[in-house]
């Protein structure tokens, strides 16, 4: 292995930081999660977690955790299941946002013009998030993620009501 890791960064092939999020990834479209890629977390990273919030209301639209430390990407359209096989062992909760009755991603559902949505990838100091299950609330899972954060990278997109 080489020297120290570079900056911890999150990117997407679907949009660049500050750009608009296509309808495909919103509640009014196919409502599928965009592909995400991140660089290696800092020394001591044992797993990753991914969340997405509506910046204006701070409402959680996605909480995914227990992503193995050797994983650096999520493909487009992460299945809406509490426990995933890809990435193996990853878990999601129901966010109950904007009418969601499923575990996993619920896309931007803006009520007005130019609203921001931020995706976060957290490098965590645990391989498996303790005390959280797929039956936990999104807020409980998010708090547990933040309690084990070594580093965080973010990517923000905008969406407007159509």
Image (cartoon, rainbow, N blue to C red):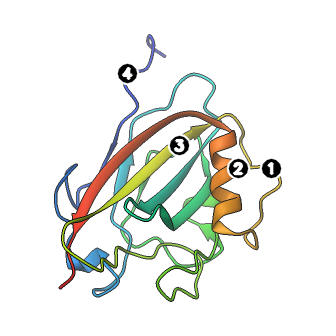
Nearer to us of marks 4 and 1 is 1
Decide if residue 88 is on the left or right side of residue 79: right
Question: Which residue has dot 1 on it?
Answer: 130
- Give the label, 3 or 2, closer to the camera: 2
* Label 1 environment density (alpha carbons within 10 Å; few <14, some 14–19, many ≥20): few
Q: Is residue 115 above or below residue 48?
A: below
For residue 122, the mark is: 3
Seen from this angle, which residue lies furthest top? 3
Which image quarter: residue 94? Answer: bottom right
Residue found at the very far right of the displayed protein: 131
Q: Earlier in the sequence, mark 3 or mark 2?
A: 3
Residue at the spot of label 2: 144
Label 3: few (<14), some or many (≥20) within 10 Å? many
Tags 3 and 2 in contact by the CB under 8 Å rule? no
Q: How many marks?
A: 4
- Which is nearer the N-term, disc 4 or disc 3? 4
Relative to residue 149, is residue 34 drawn left or right? left
Percent across and percent down for residue 92 are: 62, 67
Residue 105 screen position, x and y as percent = 47, 72
Labels 2 and 1 touching (C-beta < 8 A): yes
What is the CA distance from the residue labelled 3 to the residue labelled 2?
11 Å
What whole-number distance in Å separates the C-alpha atoms at marks 2 and 1? Answer: 8 Å
**Mark closer to the observer (2, 4):** 2
Q: Secondary structure at mark 3?
A: strand
- Name the residue carrying label 4: 6
Q: CA distance from mark 2 to mark 4?
A: 26 Å
């Amino acid at each position: 292995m080489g020297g120290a890791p570079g900056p911890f960064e999150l990117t997407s092939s679907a949009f660049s930081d500050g750009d608009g999020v296509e309808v495909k990834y919103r509640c009014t479209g196919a409502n599928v999660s965009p592909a995400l890629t991140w660089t290696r977390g800092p020394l001591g990273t044992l797993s990753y977690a991914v969340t997405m919030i509506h910046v204006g209301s701070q409402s959680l639209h996605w909480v995914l955790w227990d992503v193995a430390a050797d994983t650096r990407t999520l493909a487009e359209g992460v299945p809406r299941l509490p426990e995933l096989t890809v990435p193996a062992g990853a878990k999601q909760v129901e966010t109950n946002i904007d009418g969601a009755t499923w575990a996993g991603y619920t896309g931007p559902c803006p009520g007005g013009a130019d609203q921001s949505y931020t995706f976060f990838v957290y490098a965590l100091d645990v391989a498996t998030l303790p005390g959280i299950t797929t039956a936990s609330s999104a807020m409980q899972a998010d708090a547990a993620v933040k309690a084990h954060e070594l580093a965080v990278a973010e990517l923000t997109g905008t969406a407007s009501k159509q």
